[in-house]
């Protein structure tokens, strides 16, 4: 079938709108019509060429929601008409990772996903007979996309797809990092570096848990208003200080925070986020994604004296089992999503959505098919 799509033809160039060919679902696969997709900073990162797994030409996009059109042979858990959220972190329930009870990082389709193909090693997308790569197992920048069954969470049909698409990455990642990875306790003091959708979702998660002080840090002070609405109590612009930002936070918190979250993808800030944690128990969670070849460093004494460095992918959330509850919680008013959506546009304006994100003018732009 034909599908409207925005193609990443080469690094650092705008996406190109094309009508592509999409093959039907094979064994264990599902064809989905996306209703809406948003743009996460990770899409911009891969398009920039900094992602060691970035492939061109490809169909990017991983934060979407849609409706099942057709299922391939052997698919038992989904049927046409089901409402679904694509998962870049699949959940097969059977691999060593899924059975461990220690991680959400399923291994069922991760290797082929990173190679931009379906689990059988081939692509379902093509343009003029030439294959296009899939992306993060989702490729939500095509109206019709094909995913493995294990990469789809079935959710309530009551929920608006053009809102819950944000649960495909940003909102879930931030809330999950607080609840599952850090396991923040009520009364904690936390620092959040970077106030895009991820940082704001961390703030939301921390407020849900009853954190006492939530320090919001960004070099763009325009982000502070929204951070306050989500529950931040303190606001710091590193550019307002001569001291290193970790020292500023330590001075403001009687020795450091209980938990910090890096939501930018800057390895220097990752160091600051670790070092602003309290001696003896402070934990720093890396959520931001850094470019190829970049490395983190700190003095080992930072860890010897009790600080802990951790990372979080998709907030440690197991998508197929847990996302339906996030959707229900949104419908009950327990999880905020609408507040992240600063812009709505037709899908064809997707390059504008990237520009807004780069200029720091949007939190999330929802693109409607
Ligand atoms: P965003 O661009 O909307 O937000 C980033 C924020 O960081 C901006 O407000 C910007 O002003 C701020 N910032 C930039 N440099 C800064 C600095 N030196 N100090 C303080 N603030 C600074 O991005 P986003 O969509 O919220 O994504 C944030 C990061 O999280 C990206 O690296 C993205 O790839 C990553 N991410 C990771 C996961 C995961 O599962 N680990 C999931 C989603 C996104
Ligand atoms: N491709 C990059 C890794 C990128 C990365 O860390 N991705 C996050 C999700 S970002 C969503 O916006 C993630 O889930 N990582 C776990 C995984 O399995 O990749 C690289 O460096 O190769
Ligand atoms: Zn993302």
Image: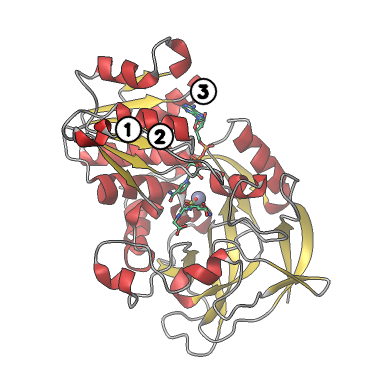
Query: In the rendering, at what x and y percent does residue 256 appear?
Result: 24, 24
- Would you say residue 195 is visible in this rendering? no
- Would you say residue 301 is visible in this rendering? yes
The answer to whether residue 196 is left or right of residue 366 is left
Q: Between disc 2 and disc 3, whose residue precedes?
A: 3
Label 2 lies in ligand 1 vicinity (Cβ under 8 Å)? no
Instruction: Tell me the residue that label 1 is attached to.
Output: 274
Query: In the rendering, at what x and y percent does residue 211 appear?
Result: 22, 34
Label 2, secondary structure: give it. Answer: helix
Circles 1 and 3, Cβ within 8 Å, touching? The answer is no
Which quadrant would residue 100 be assigned to in this image?
Answer: bottom left
Looking at the picture, does residue 139 appear above or below residue 202?
below
For the residues labelled 2 and 3, the Cα–Cα distance comes to: 18 Å
Label 3 lies in ligand 1 vicinity (Cβ under 8 Å)? yes
The residue depicted at 54 percent of the width and 71 percent of the height is: 112
Quarter that holds the C terminus: bottom right
The residue depicted at 40 percent of the width and 53 percent of the height is: 313
Which quadrant would residue 140 be assigned to in this image?
Answer: bottom right
Quarter that holds the N terminus: bottom right
Q: Residue furthest front?
A: 300
- Check residue 220 in the rendering and tell me which mark sits there, or answer none: 3
Circles 2 and 1, Cβ within 8 Å, touching? The answer is yes
How is the rendered protein coloured?
secondary structure
For the residues labelled 1 and 3, the Cα–Cα distance comes to: 21 Å
The residue depicted at 63 percent of the width and 57 percent of the height is: 60
- The one nearer the camera, 57 or 348, is 57
Q: Nearer the viewer, mark 1 or mark 3?
A: 1
Q: Residue furthest right?
A: 128
Query: In the rendering, at what x and y percent does residue 144 appear?
Result: 65, 69
Query: In the rendering, at what x and y percent does residue 288 appear?
Result: 45, 42
């Amino acid at each position: 079938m034909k599908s409207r799509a925005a193609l990443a033809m080469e690094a650092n160039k705008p996406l190109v709108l094309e009508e592509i060919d999409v093959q039907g679902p094979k064994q264990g696969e599902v064809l989905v019509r996306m209703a809406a997709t948003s743009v996460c900073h990770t899409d911009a990162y891969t398009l920039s060429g900094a992602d060691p797994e970035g492939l061109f030409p490809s169909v990017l996009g991983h934060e979407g929601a849609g409706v099942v059109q057709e299922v391939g042979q052997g698919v038992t858990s989904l049927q046409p008409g089901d409402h679904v959220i694509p998962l870049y972190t699949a959940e097969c329930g059977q691999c060593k990772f899924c059975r461990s009870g220690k991680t959400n990082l399923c291994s069922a389709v991760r290797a082929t996903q990173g190679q931009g193909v379906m689990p059988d090693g081939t692509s379902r997308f093509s343009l003029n007979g030439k294959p296009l790569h899939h992306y993060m197992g989702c490729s939500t920048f095509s109206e019709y996309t094909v995913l493995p069954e294990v990469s789809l969470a079935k959710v309530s049909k009551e929920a608006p797809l053009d809102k819950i698409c944000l649960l495909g990455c940003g909102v879930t990642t931030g809330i999950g990092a607080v609840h599952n990875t850090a396991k923040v306790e009520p009364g904690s003091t936390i620092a959040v570096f970077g106030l895009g959708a991820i940082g704001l979702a961390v703030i939301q998660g921390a407020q849900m848990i009853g954190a006492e002080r939530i320090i919001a840090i960004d070099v763009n002070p325009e982000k502070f208003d929204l951070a306050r609405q989500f529950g931040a109590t303190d606001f710091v612009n590193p550019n307002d200080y001569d001291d290193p930002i970790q020292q500023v936070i330590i001075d403001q918190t009687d020795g450091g925070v209980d938990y910090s979250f890096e939501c930018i993808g800057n390895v220097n800030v990752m160091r600051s986020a670790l070092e602003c944690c309290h001696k003896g128990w402070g934990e720093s969670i890396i959520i931001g994604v850094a470019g190829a070849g970049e490395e983190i460093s700190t003095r080992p004494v930072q860890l010897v004296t009790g600080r802990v460095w951790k990372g979080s992918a998709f907030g440690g959330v197991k998508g197929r089992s847990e996302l339906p509850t996030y959707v229900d919680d949104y419908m009950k008013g327990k999880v905020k999503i609408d507040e992240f959506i600063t812009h709505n546009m037709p899908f064809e304006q997707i390059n504008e959505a990237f520009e807004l994100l780069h200029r720091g003018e949007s939190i999330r732009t929802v693109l409607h098919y």
